[in-house]
Amino acid sequence: MWPQAENAGRRRVLDDRELVVDSKTLKRRGFVKICASAAVSVSASPSLLANQKSPVRQYNRVKLLDAQKRAVTAESLEQGVSYVFNYPYVTTPCFLLNLGKPADGNELLQTEEGEEYRWQGGVGPHRSIVSFCAICAHKMTHPSKAVSFINYRHEEVSFKDKAENPVRRPGVIYCCSEKSVYDPARGARVLGGPAPQPLGAIALEYDKKEGAIYASGTYGGELYREFFDTFAFRLALEFGTSDIQQKVSDTAIVTSIEQYSATQMLC
Ligand code: FES
């Protein structure tokens, strides 16, 4: 059952609370079929075409807007803030981050199924803007309207790496359910915890002329089928729709995670 925040405050520190998701409901991750017509979706990002190990699953090309319906630009994204938008479905959250430094990409990553892909790095004038699916690759913890157990942490935090050694460093995506930690500057590769694969990557395009940012697809491992199977009832209630798999079209609204989720559980 999804955790409900009691006496919700804006930000709360989490000790060892866990988000409980019945692991029996989880299926093996599939490396979902690749869209052969990726060329259409990445016209403003030819590097995505250049490397055959970064095939993009094409979804609608959507322009990212702020709450006032203005185009989100690299300059409008504050460094260190966790922004969230729903993509490629109206119920699936993604992180949008300005890392404040170039994320050069070309990271060779692997899904749980062993499929290799190359993360292409950040977009924008400084290549510092990155986006990932905000659904944890372990048991699919994700930001809901009530609470988020998974967050970008720009400040220095403590965690254990894969060899269980203690680490302190800034700039990680931290899932406090069972403490999986991802590196958004390196394609959201897993730094520690039980996650079996990186967070799914969102293909971004940067339109130099208008300064706008578009989402146009996904690559890497994705968990949407399992996500819909597991959370269908809650998503329908939360988003007030019976069509939880409706695809986002044309535009998506970007908000800070504090606006998206009432409570942040930090660890
Ligand atoms: S759901 Fe277990 S670490 Fe994220």
Image (spheres, rainbow, N blue to C red):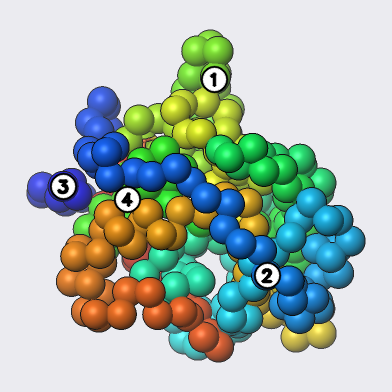
Q: Which mark is residue 35?
A: 2
Question: In this rendering, would 24 be left or right of 72?
Answer: left
Q: Name, please, the residue furthest toward the left.
A: 7
Q: CA distance from mark 4 to mark 3?
A: 14 Å
What residue did someone put label 4 on? 148
Which amino acid type corresponds to the residue marked 2 in the rendered image? Cys
What residue did someone put label 3 on? 1
Specify which label sits upstream in the sequence, 4 or 1. Answer: 4
Q: CA distance from mark 4 to mark 1?
A: 22 Å
From this view, report whether residue 133 is shown above or below residue 216: above
Are there few (<14), some (14-19), or many (20+) residues within 10 Å of tag 1?
A: some
Picture coordinates of residue 47 (x, y %)? 86, 63
Quadrant in which residue 54 is drawn: bottom right
Which-is-in-front pick, marks 4 and 3?
Answer: 3
Q: Tell me the element at label 1.
A: loop
Picture coordinates of residue 36 (x, y %)? 73, 71
Residue 158 seen in the current view: no
Quadrant in which residue 186 is drawn: top right
Q: Name, please, the residue furthest toward the right.
A: 50
Q: CA distance from mark 3 to mark 1?
A: 28 Å
Report the quarter where the C terminus lies.
Answer: top left
What residue did someone put label 1 on? 161
